[in-house]
Amino acid sequence: MRIDVLVVPDCPNGPVVIERLAQALGGRADVQVATRVIDTIEQADRWGMHGSPTVLIDGRDPFARPGTLASVSCRLYQDEGGRAQGAPSLTRLRQALDGRRSAARARARPEHRPTAAGATSDDT
């Protein structure tokens, strides 16, 4: 898994999200984390930055709403209680990481193929 943290220069929430990611990952050696400073709207558009900080997990922003435009502004996230924060909460990061692992496991599973009498290959 690859995680890119996109920040504008001197973003005060960049270190917060990096610390929370470290906690959420728990020292996993199979994850590469990189921080990238984004200076221009063109870079933000190319990378898929929706405000600072943006967390990309394997190139995807799990916190972006559909249709969100690229931005080099500050970004707010809602925690579990609906409060605004400058970085995703530890719980939300864990959920995003778990969702990514679940999707990877689903892709690795063999296809379900129908068998006789409508059962799937997992049922036999």
Image (cartoon, rainbow, N blue to C red):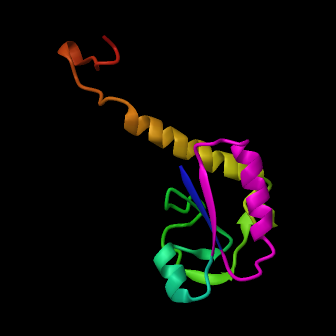
Report the front residue among 75 and 38: 38
Residue span colored magenta: 7-36
Report the front residue among 99 and 10: 10
Q: Please, is residue 75 above or below residue 39 in the view?
A: above
Report the front residue among 110 and 8: 8
The C terminus - image quarter = top left
Q: Please, is residue 51 above or below residue 99 in the view?
A: below
Residue 107 x, y percent position in the rendering: 38, 39
Residue 5 sits in which quadrant? Answer: bottom right
Q: Please, is residue 15 above or below residue 26 in the view?
A: below
Residue 13 x, y percent position in the rendering: 78, 70
- For this orientation, the residue located farthest to the front is 29
Residue 65 sits in which quadrant? Answer: bottom right
Residue at (80%, 55%) from the top-left corner? 81
**Magenta stretch encompasses residue 22:** yes
**Magenta stretch encompasses residue 96:** no
Residue 114 x, y percent position in the rendering: 22, 23
Residue 43 in view here: yes
- Left or right side of 10 for 71: left
Residue 79 in view here: no
Q: Please, is residue 31 above or below residue 105 in the view?
A: below
Residue 35 sits in which quadrant? Answer: bottom right
Residue at (71%, 43%) from the top-left corner? 27
- For this orientation, the residue located farthest to the top is 124
Residue at (58%, 43%) from the top-left corner? 30
Q: How many marks?
A: 0
Residue 87 x, y percent position in the rendering: 75, 65
Residue at (18%, 14%) from the top-left corner? 116
